[in-house]
Image (spheres, rainbow, N blue to C red):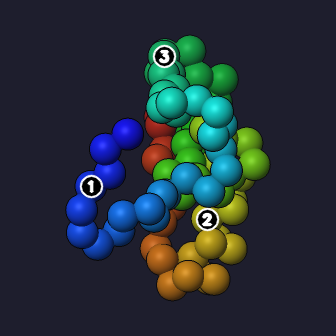
């Protein structure tokens, strides 16, 4: 494994979601969404990843971050 040099080395965005996978990839067929508006997590803290469960609110309050979900519309 080759590690990058510089700031941020060793700092990952994903704290614990599917860490046994080399890369976490999800795909969605938008026309098959069950709801007209479906929120997808972008903060990597959701207990229902890849769907948003509102955990970004706690993360933002704790860190001062401003992340929120991606909203897919059917
Ligand atoms: Fe991650 Fe909402 S829980 S964006």
Residue 9 to residue 70: above or below: below
Q: Secondary structure at mark 2?
A: helix
Residue 32 to residue 23: above or below: above
Residue 55 to residue 16: above or below: below
Residue 20 at what x, y percent from top left? 64, 33
Q: CB of residue at label 3: within 8 Å of ligand 1?
A: no
Q: Which residue is the extreme one toward the front?
A: 1
Given residues 71 and 47, the one toward you in this image is 47
Give the residue drawn at x 56%, y 15%.
32
Give the residue drawn at x 56%, y 82%.
63
Whole-Å distance between the Cαs marked 1 and 3? Answer: 34 Å
Q: Secondary structure at mark 1?
A: loop
47 relative to 1 in the view: left or right: right
The numbered disc on residue 49 is none
The numbered disc on residue 56 is 2
Give the residue drawn at x 66%, y 23%.
34
Tag nearer the camera, 1 or 2: 1
Whole-Å distance between the Cαs marked 1 and 2? Answer: 28 Å
Residue 39 at what x, y percent from top left? 57, 44
Tag nearer the camera, 1 or 3: 1
Q: CB of residue at label 2: within 8 Å of ligand 1?
A: yes
Q: Which residue is the extreme one toward the left?
A: 5
Few, some or many residues within 10 Å of mark 2 (<14, 14–19, 20+): many
Asked if residue 74 shows in the view, the reply is no
Label 3: which residue?
29
Total marks placed: 3
Task: Tell me which numbered mark, 2 or 3, is placed earlier along the sequence.
Answer: 3
Label 1: which residue?
4
């Amino acid at each position: 494994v080759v590690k990058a040099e510089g700031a941020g080395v060793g700092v990952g965005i994903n704290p614990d979601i599917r860490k046994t996978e080399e890369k976490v990839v999800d795909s969605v067929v938008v026309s098959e969404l069950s709801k007209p508006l479906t929120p997808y997590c972008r903060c990597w803290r959701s207990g229902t990843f890849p769907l948003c469960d509102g955990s970004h609110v706690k993360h933002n309050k704790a860190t001062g971050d401003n992340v929120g979900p991606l909203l897919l519309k059917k």
